[in-house]
Image: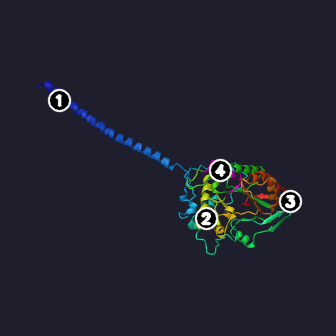
Amino acid sequence: MTEEKKFRTSNQSRKKVRRKRNSSLWLLLLIPLIIGLGVALGLTVNYILNMRANKPQQTIASDATLPGADSTTKAAESTAPDTTEEVIPPETTEAETTPEATEPTQPEDKFSPTKSVDELLPVPDGIVRDGDEISKGGWYGGKFVRDLKTGEVKCEWDRTAAIISMLNKYGAIYHKNEDQKVCYLTFDCGGTSDAEMVGEILDILKEKNVKAIFFIPGDFFLYPLNKEGEAIREDRAAVMRRIVEEGHLIGSHTYTHPQMPKLSDEEFIFQLNTQQARIDAALGYAYPLSYYRPPEGATSERDLYLAQKMGYHVTLWSYAYLDWNASEQMEVGEALTKAKIGLHDGCVYLLHALSSTNRAMLGDLIDYMKDQGYDIRRIDQ
């Protein structure tokens, strides 16, 4: 081999060595760069996932997680919807929308929306469970008759002193402030009541500058009520928010409107706890329920005891008439006369929102109450 050929071969070998060396150097430089990019990508993905996980969400618990919902209460569970629909809280507060609105009687920071079975049971021995001594199948008030010419009121008959004493013992309401010229308007919103009907009543109350309480059963905002559950209708939720925003109260009328004295202790608790949860779901926040009206007014000492322990005043009435059948409404003038005759000191009126007669006569009834010198108060006043 010539010297020149040897030189070319040696030179080519050196170039190959340098290329291999340079390739190894670039590889060594790329490895940490790739690792760094991988770490940065991982941190970015982790940050995004954490942001999503920490985003505030408000959901409504299913009935299986409601306090007081016992798996053995088959009758109550058979009608219990299970929904996880997101609820959006109102954008404005009561104070922002209606400065004149009265604050709830029970501060929210001291309010416990529901109480568990373990907190409430057992019911002490000696508490009477039969409702016969208070109401046989339903409540009936006394008979108070006003002379429309003279304004004189006579009590033709009343409930016994023992029953009235028991109601007072547990903070229940039948009359209220009977020694004052005051009266109270209460509306039950069950059956075929809808948002438009309640809205008409609210319009009249607003025009007359009068406050009231609306007792809400489960079927008002979940209709038809069934075990599969239905989304809360927005028009029902909106009118309930309006009730509160305009300074009125909401009361519980139970979840499925049963005869409460016939229920077990656990079922009784389930009815009120579940309805509290549904009202909260409709409003979008924990509402301080303090008043409960038993369906048909049926109650017992056991019911009074449990309701009081759960933070409720059982609210009955001292005036009512046959207004609850939407298809058989009384003539407006006749119903107005009956309502006027029933006016007495401390009178608690029971009116049903579904009644077209009630909505037609309400303004005139309020005017009559005021003309007679009555102060129309909210039930907590």
Image marks 3 and 1: residues in contact by CB distance under 8 Å: no
The residue tagged 4 is 236
| Amino acid type at image mark 4 | Arg
Query: Of marks 3 and 1, which one's residue comes earlier in the chain?
Result: 1
Residue 66 percent coordinates (x, y):
56, 59
Residues rendered magenta in the picture: 232-251
Query: Of marks 1 and 4, which one's residue comes earlier in the chain?
Result: 1
How far, Cα to Cα, is label 4 from label 2? 25 Å
The residue tagged 1 is 10
Question: For residue 114: magenta?
Answer: no
The residue tagged 2 is 268
Above or below 168: residue 354: above
How far, Cα to Cα, is label 1 from label 4? 94 Å
Query: Of marks 1 and 2, which one's residue comes earlier in the chain?
Result: 1
Describe the element under mark 4 as helix, strand or loop: helix
Q: Nearer the viewer, mark 1 or mark 2?
A: 2
